Image (cartoon, rainbow, N blue to C red):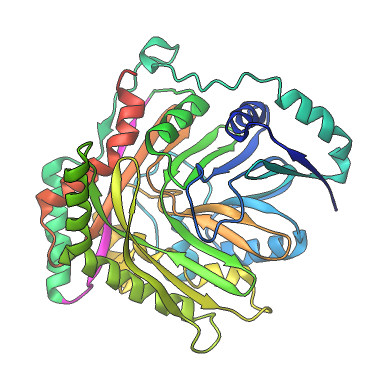
């Protein structure tokens, strides 16, 4: 059982910074921030969960069954992540590529302390064992200086981070050509192909790095995740799956264009993306896949496409996003809704299983948390999860930093242009880690 207290926040932006500083004392942290991005389906502007009372950490073997049991027993708020490699639990697949991050495949925890922010209203939900500390914690939080001090790593104890490529440009292009040969043979229609950038024997200040990444991108699904000495710093623009009551929403992104500081040129780039036949075909193929996935748990005839190939603009890029919705029976297990749609279509391809088999063969790094999902389940079985993209992953103990980027390969793909799109998507992470501020 939880005690709930409500407060009015004078300055939500300032309070959010204070809250994230205060949270760093705990071993388990998940911070979710919409950056005030207007979204039709959002429940909260920001959420912080800290200080695990119970938790589950496991590999992919029976991972969804273990999560289902944990979620049903907890009957409470639980927060965590699903790694891409849970595909091995839902299909006869394997993950044998190089992995230096060493994150578990699945991690969720039941927080003792939970903060929900909407506008200038704050709800604090504490488990009874710590509920006598609510007012004291709020007082302490407000003492933190609300300064996002973004320092240059070159001037810090860590030094400047030097990024290496796991795959050369020539190797990348060769592998895209192999992917295209699979498409031309009819093995697949589309697949998401990714490459890793990394730094060994390097360290960062995780919170300052997150602040910088978030400031560059201000995405609607930003996340700071800490699990002991492992971190995910995410500037994700993409929602994977949301459940509100009997309604389920998926919002796949496929289609990217750069932005321009020139207003007229920026509008031209937006319109070009909107009309681009390759980008539209990518998006529509994934929409069909998502419709099929949602139909596995939907009530008959309830799967609909609410938005098709709509353009949304973010600080660095324009994105093509579709919204697919379904209705589910109230008795339907929330974990099973995720199980039957995971991994998300935007990060796999079509047909999904064939695409994942080819992805595993051509990629050289294990994806892990990248292209998985971070989010939460509520006590009534609602949930909201992002797609882990535009993210920096950090193993502090191993001093290993990684970010991965990718894109959809279709019959119309040009290897050089696909590589350029990867660099565009990687720009924010590289700037955060390498450039002076």
Choose between 22 and 228: the one closer to the eye: 22
- Span colored in magenta: 186-200
- Quarter holding the C terminus? top left
Q: Can you give x and y, in whole percent of width and height, for residue 128 in the image?
A: 87, 45
Q: Can you give x and y, in whole percent of width and height, for residue 276 in the image?
A: 17, 62
Q: Is residue 189 magenta?
A: yes
Count of number-bearing discs = 0
Q: Residue at x 61, y 50 (%)?
A: 44
Q: Residue at x 23, y 53 (%)?
A: 270
Q: Residue 95's image quarter?
A: bottom left
Choose between 216 and 106: the one closer to the eye: 216
Q: Residue 189's image quarter?
A: bottom left
- Is any atom of residue 363 visible in this view? no
Choose between 263 and 344: the one closer to the eye: 263
Task: Find the residue positioned furthest to the front.
Answer: 264
Asked if residue 434 is positioned above or below residue 31 in the image, the reply reads above
Q: Quick check: 394 left or right of 58?
A: left
Q: Is residue 40 magenta?
A: no
- Is any atom of residue 274 visible in this view? yes
Name the chief secondary structure element in magenta.
strand
Q: Quick check: 379 left or right of 399?
A: right
Asked if residue 353 is positioned above or below residue 415 in the image, the reply reads below
Q: Quick check: 434 left or right of 382?
A: left
Asked if residue 89 is positioned above or below residue 12 in the image, the reply reads below
Task: Find the residue positioned furthest to the bottom.
Answer: 300
Q: Can you give x and y, in whole percent of width and height, for residue 274 in the image?
A: 22, 61
Q: Residue at x 45, y 41 (%)?
A: 234
Asked if residue 170 is positioned above or below residue 199 in the image, the reply reads below
């Amino acid at each position: 059982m939880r005690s709930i207290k409500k407060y009015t926040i004078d300055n939500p932006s300032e309070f959010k910074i204070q809250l994230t500083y205060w949270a760093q004392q705990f071993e388990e942290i998940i911070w979710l921030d919409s950056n005030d991005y207007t979204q039709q389906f959002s429940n909260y502007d920001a959420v912080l969960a800290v200080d695990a009372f119970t938790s589950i950490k496991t590999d992919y073997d029976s991972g969804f069954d273990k999560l289902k049991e944990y979620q049903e027993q907890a009957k409470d708020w639980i927060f965590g992540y699903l790694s891409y490699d849970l595909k091995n639990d839902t299909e006869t697949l394997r993950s044998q590529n190089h992995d230096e991050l060493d994150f578990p495949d699945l991690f969720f925890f039941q927080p003792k302390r939970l903060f929900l922010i909407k506008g200038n209203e704050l709800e604090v939900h504490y488990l009874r064992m710590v509920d006598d500390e609510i007012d004291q914690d709020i007082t302490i939080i407000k003492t933190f200086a609300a300064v996002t001090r973004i320092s240059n790593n070159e001037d810090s104890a860590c030094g400047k981070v030097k990024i290496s490529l796991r795959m050369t440009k020539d190797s990348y292009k060769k592998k895209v050509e192999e992917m295209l040969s699979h498409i031309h043979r009819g093995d697949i229609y589309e697949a998401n192909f990714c490459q890793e950038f990394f730094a060994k024997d390097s360290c960062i200040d995780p919170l300052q790095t997150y602040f910088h990444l978030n400031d560059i991108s201000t995405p609607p699904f930003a996340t700071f995740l800490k699990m002991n000495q492992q971190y995910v710093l995410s500037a994700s623009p993409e929602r994977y799956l949301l459940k509100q009551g009997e309604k389920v929403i998926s919002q796949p992104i496929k289609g990217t264009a750069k932005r321009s500081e020139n207003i007229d040129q920026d509008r031209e780039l937006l319109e070009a993306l909107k009309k681009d036949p390759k980008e539209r075909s990518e998006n529509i193929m994934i929409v069909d896949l998502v419709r099929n996935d949602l139909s596995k748990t939907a009530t008959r005839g309830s799967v609909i496409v609410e938005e098709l190939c709509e353009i949304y603009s973010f600080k660095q890029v324009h994105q093509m996003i579709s919204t697919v919705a379904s209705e589910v029976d109230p008795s339907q297990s929330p974990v099973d809704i995720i199980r039957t749609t995971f991994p998300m279509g935007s990060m796999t391809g079509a047909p999904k299983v064939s695409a994942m088999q080819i992805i595993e063969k051509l990629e050289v790094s294990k994806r892990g948390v990248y292209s998985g999902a971070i989010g939460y389940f509520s006590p009534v079985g609602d949930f909201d999860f992002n797609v882990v993209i535009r993210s920096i992953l950090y193993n502090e103990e191993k001093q290993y930093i990684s970010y991965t980027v990718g894109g959809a390969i279709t019959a119309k793909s040009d290897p050089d242009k696909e590589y350029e799109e990867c660099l565009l998507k990687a720009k924010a992470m590289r700037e955060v880690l390498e450039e002076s501020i």
